[in-house]
Image (spheres, rainbow, N blue to C red):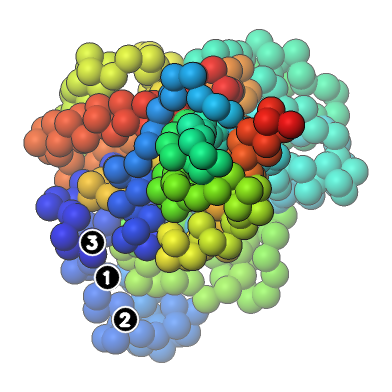
Amino acid sequence: VRYSPTLVDHFLNPRNAGLMREPDSVGENEYEGCGDLTRFFLRVRDGRAVEIRFQTYGCGPTIAAASMASELYRGRLVGDLCRLEAGEIERALEGLPDDRKHAADIAAGALRAAAFQYQARRG
Amino acid sequence: MESKLMSRRVYLDHNASTPVHPEVLAEMLPYFAEVYGNPSSIHAFGREAREGMDLARERVASFLKVSSQEIVFTSGGTESDNFAVKGLAWARGKGHLITSQVEHHAVIRACRALEAQGFDLTCVGVDEFGMVDPDAVRRAIRPDTVAISIMHANSEVGTIQPIEAIGRIAREHGIPFHVDAVQTFGKLPLDVNALGIDALSFSAHKLYGPKGVAGLFIRKGSKMVAVQHGGEHERRRRAGTENVAGIVGLGKAVEIRARDMHTEAERVTALRDRLWDGVRSRVPEVRLSGHPGHRLPGTASFLFRHVESESVVLGLDLKGIGVSAGSACTSGNVEPSHVLVAMGVPLEWAMGAVRCSLGRSTSAADIDYVIECVEPLVRKLRQAMPVGVV
C-alpha cells in the first residue's frame, strides 16, 4: 500500500462523514480535472467550529483528507479556518504521493469555503 | 502493515497479467544457464537453443492451425500490435485504415501515429455492449483501405467482437485483417483460417506464461514490412536475438492452455456468474458492463453508480483483493475509460467502473470473500457521498 497507515485508517473509517442538519454554513470545492468534490458543513458556537461534517466524491486520499480535516479543525476559530493550508492536512495524513497532492487541496479549499461563507453571513 | 490487514489474498486481475504456470517455469529454467547459446549460432550451443524455440513455434502454430513459418516472436502484445498495424500500412505506403474506438491503446495509438504520417483513419463506434457492427466496418471501407484491425475481445469489458463476420467482409474486399487476440489467445478457440485473419497478436503473460514475450501470426504471402531492423532473425521479419527462455515458456503455456482451455472456461464462467449474482443481490445501483452473452469467460466489469472506482480498488486492496479500476486518475486528472465512453456509458456510472478478471487459481471461496468485502465497502463509500454530484 502506497499510503500511510493514518491515511488508510481515515479512508476505511472516515470520521464525521455525512450530511449535517441545519448547518451554520456549507462550503464546497471541486477539483478541476478529476471531478473530485468535497463539501463541508460547519456548526459554529462562540466563533468556533464545534462540529464539522463532510461529504465527498473522490479517490481514497480525497476521502481520507476530508475526514482528517474534519477532526483537525474541530474546535478552532472560524477565522483560523479561513487561513488553513493544504500542507497541514497533508502532514497530518503523514504525507501524500506526488500524484495525490490534490486530495489535501480539495479538502482545504472546501473547508475554507465553508468558513468564508460563515463569515460572510455574519457580515 | 499489510500483514496485519490482510488475512487472505485474492487476485482478480488476470486480464492484466497471470502467474507463470509451474510447468511453464520448469520448462523455461534450463534456458537461462544451461541452454544459453544464441539461436542464430550454428554450433551445438546455438542449435540447442534453436531447438527449444522451434518446438515453441510448433506448439503455437498447431494451436492456431497454421504453419510454424507464419509465427513471429516479439517482446510483447504492444510490439505485436505495432508490428501488425504499421507493417501492413507501411508496406502499402499510403491509404486508409479501419479500427474501432474500443481497441487497446497499442492499436489505437499506432493507428494515430500512422494518421500523423498521412494515412487516413476511421475508428468505427460500438453499441452499448461495446460491440462493433460488421456493417459499420463494411460502410467504412474505401477503395484505398489498406488494413482493418479489430480486437477479438475487449480487456476492460470482456465483449467478444464478431470477428468472423468482419473477417468475411475484409476477405470479400481483399483487405488484410489484423486481430488483437491478446485477451482471447488460450482462452477461446481460434481458427485464423475460418475467421479470415491475416495477422493476429498474442501474448504469453495473459495465459500463464512469462512477461516480455509475445507473438504475431502473419499469413504467408501477406504484404508486410518489418518495423524493427537489424539482423536476420525471425526470417527477417523481426530483428533482434530472440528471448529463448521466454519463447519456450510461451510454447509450453500454449500447450497447457490447448489442453485445459475448455474446462477452465466453463469453470471460470460459473465463478464469474456467481460473483455477479452475489454482488447484484447485495449492492444496489450496480451494472455489469459489456455484452451479456458474448463475453470473455472470466471477466466481470462492474459499474457502481455514484462511487469512484479508485476508492473501490483501494478498499479491496486493503482486504487483500486485487482488481482494476476502469477510470484512471493520474496527477489529479481522471480519464474515464475510452471503452466505456465509446459505449455511451453515462459518467456517473463510468467513473465507478471496476474490473474483476478471474483465472485458474480463483476458487468459489475467493469469490464469496470478494462479495462479502464489496458490499460494506461500497455502502460506506456511498455514505460519505453527496448524492448527484456527478
Q: Residue beneath label 3, please?
A: B2
How far apart, in angstroms, are the residues tagged by discs 1 and 2?
7 Å
Q: Residue beneath label 1, please?
A: B28
Question: What SS does tag 1 mark?
Answer: helix
Q: Chain of mark 1?
A: B
From where the camera sits, is residue B262 visible?
no
Residue located 49% across and 36% down the image: A45
Q: Mark on residue B312?
A: none
- Residue B96 lies in what quarter of the image? top right
**Quarter of the figure that contains the N terminus of chain B:** bottom left
How far apart, in angstroms, are the residues tagged by discs 1 and 3?
32 Å
Disc 3 marks which amino acid?
Glu
Disc 1 marks which amino acid?
Met
Residue A30: x and y, percent? Answer: 64, 36
Q: Is residue A116 left or right of residue B307?
A: right
Q: Answer yes or no: do the residues labelled 1 and 2 have beta carbons within 8 Å?
A: yes
Residue located 77% across and 43% down the image: B112
Q: Residue beneath label 2, please?
A: B32
Q: Nearer the viewer, residue A50 or B4?
A: A50
Q: Nearer the viewer, residue A30 or A76?
A: A76
Residue B61: x and y, percent? Answer: 39, 48
Mark before the other along the chain sequence, 3 or 2 = 3
Q: Nearer the viewer, residue B319 or B176?
A: B319
Residue that lies at the very extreme toward the right in this rendered image: B118
As drawn, B17 above or below B170? below
Residue located 83% across and 42% down the image: B115
Q: Chain of mark 2?
A: B
Question: What SS does tag 3 mark?
Answer: helix
Disc 2 marks which amino acid?
Phe
Q: How many other residues sit within 10 Å of disc 3, few (<14), some (14-19) or many (≥20)?
A: few
Q: How many other residues sit within 10 Å of disc 2, few (<14), some (14-19) or many (≥20)?
A: few
Question: What SS does tag 2 mark?
Answer: helix
